[in-house]
């Protein structure tokens, strides 16, 4: 029989019930994104399953207070050695989810585990952003017009999406989240980003014109609350659709595999930094929660400057 404990203000819970309470807390109080909930939910499910497999029984909430570091390390090792092994960064994300879960157990369910709280996180391998050059960006933005497989409205749609990524620094999900009522665009655009946070980004004339061309050629009648960008059969355009279109452009132009939809957003930030924009402004435009995320672009800019130094300095 699964053991249970009574927690003030909550229903009687076992370890899995506690996990569900935590996910509800993330969704309703922390307003975490669906992708975050999915990733954290999967990580903690595998964590509890591993512990139960090692112990040969179901877990109570009080059992989680007694989890040892060695058990957590064993679980992380299992993630790397499974039939579908996770990358080091994915293991780090899973550990972060588990540590956050234990923090919730401590603060909300009076079930502390000091060993897990003090356990150092595994090292994350942080790859630098890989932007495209300005010449590559211009080629990508015009490429859909030269694709014979696309109808005029599909080409206009792809150009508009690319322009939002490169011209406004939007994430793919943010660009595809625009609704019919958002167009025509004005001088600025309210964007719903990660964690349901809203930010305002300026809209360049070229971006506004690209979205207007897409709107003018749109063959579907949309209600104000329907998503603006549509697939060929009329359904909403998906991130996977954008990835496929960029892959086709990449192949047609002979560009490297580093050219992805997200590379256009990286390029937006990198090119602004190279032109003299300050990090705080770029942080606001990108919607980064912390400046350290934006600071990764300083390494990219340093590489650019060192390259220019090597080409230009008489003693190089």
Image (cartoon, grey):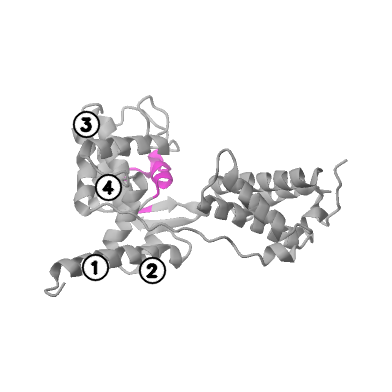
Give the label on residue 208, or none. 4
Residue 67 picture location, percent across and down: 75, 57
Asked if marks 2 and 4 touch (Cβ < 8 Å), the reply is no
Membership of 236 in magenta stretch: no
Label 3 belongs to which residue? 147
| Residue at (71, 48) in percent of width and height | 19
Q: In this view, does 205 lie to the left or right of 117?
A: left
Element under disc 1: helix
Q: In this view, does 99 lie to the left or right of 313?
A: right
Q: Which residue lies furthest to the front in this view?
A: 81
Q: Is residue 289 left or right of residue 200?
A: right
| Residue at (18, 33) in percent of width and height | 146
Q: Which residue lies furthest to the left in this view?
A: 314
Foreground disc of the pair 3, 1: 1
Q: Label 1 neighbourhood size at 10 Å, few (<14), some (14-19), many (20+)?
A: few
Q: Earlier in the sequence, mark 3 or mark 4?
A: 3
Asked if marks 3 and 4 touch (Cβ < 8 Å), the reply is no
* Magenta segment boundaries in residue numbering: 171-189
Q: Earlier in the sequence, mark 2 or mark 1?
A: 2
């Amino acid at each position: 029989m699964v053991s249970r404990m009574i927690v003030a203000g909550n229903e009687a819970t076992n370890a899995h019930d506690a996990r569900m309470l935590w996910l509800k807390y993330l969704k309703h109080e922390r307003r975490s994104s669906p992708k975050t909930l999915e990733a954290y939910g999967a990580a903690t499910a595998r964590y509890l399953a591993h512990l139960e497999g090692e112990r040969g029984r179901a877990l109570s909430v009080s059992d989680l207070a007694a989890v040892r570091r060695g058990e957590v390390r064993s679980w992380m090792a299992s993630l790397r050695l499974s039939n579908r092994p996770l990358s080091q960064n994915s293991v780090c994300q899973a550990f972060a989810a588990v540590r956050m879960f234990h923090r919730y157990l401590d603060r909300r369910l009076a079930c502390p585990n000091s060993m897990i709280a003090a356990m150092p996180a595994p090292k994350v391998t942080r790859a630098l952003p890989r932007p495209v050059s300005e010449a590559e960006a211009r080629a990508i933005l015009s490429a859909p017009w030269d694709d014979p497989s696309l109808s005029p409205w599909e080409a206009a749609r792809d150009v508009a999406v690319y322009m939002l990524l490169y011209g406004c620094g939007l994430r793919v999900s943010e660009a595809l989240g625009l609704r019919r009522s958002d167009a025509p665009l004005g001088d600025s655009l309210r964007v719903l980003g990660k964690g349901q946070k809203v930010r305002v980004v300026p809209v360049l004339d070229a971006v506004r014109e690209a979205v207007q061309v897409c709107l003018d050629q749109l063959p579907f009648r949309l209600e104000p609350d329907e998503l603006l960008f549509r697939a060929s059969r009329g359904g909403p355009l998906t991130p996977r659709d954008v990835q496929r279109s960029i892959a086709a452009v990449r192949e047609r132009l002979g560009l490297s595999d580093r050219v992805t939809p997200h590379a256009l957003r990286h390029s937006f930030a990198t090119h602004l930094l190279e032109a003299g924009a300050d990090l705080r402004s770029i942080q606001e435009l990108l919607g980064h929660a912390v400046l350290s995320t934006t600071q990764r672009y300083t390494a990219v800019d340093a590489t650019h400057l060192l390259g220019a130094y090597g080409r230009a300095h008489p003693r190089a």
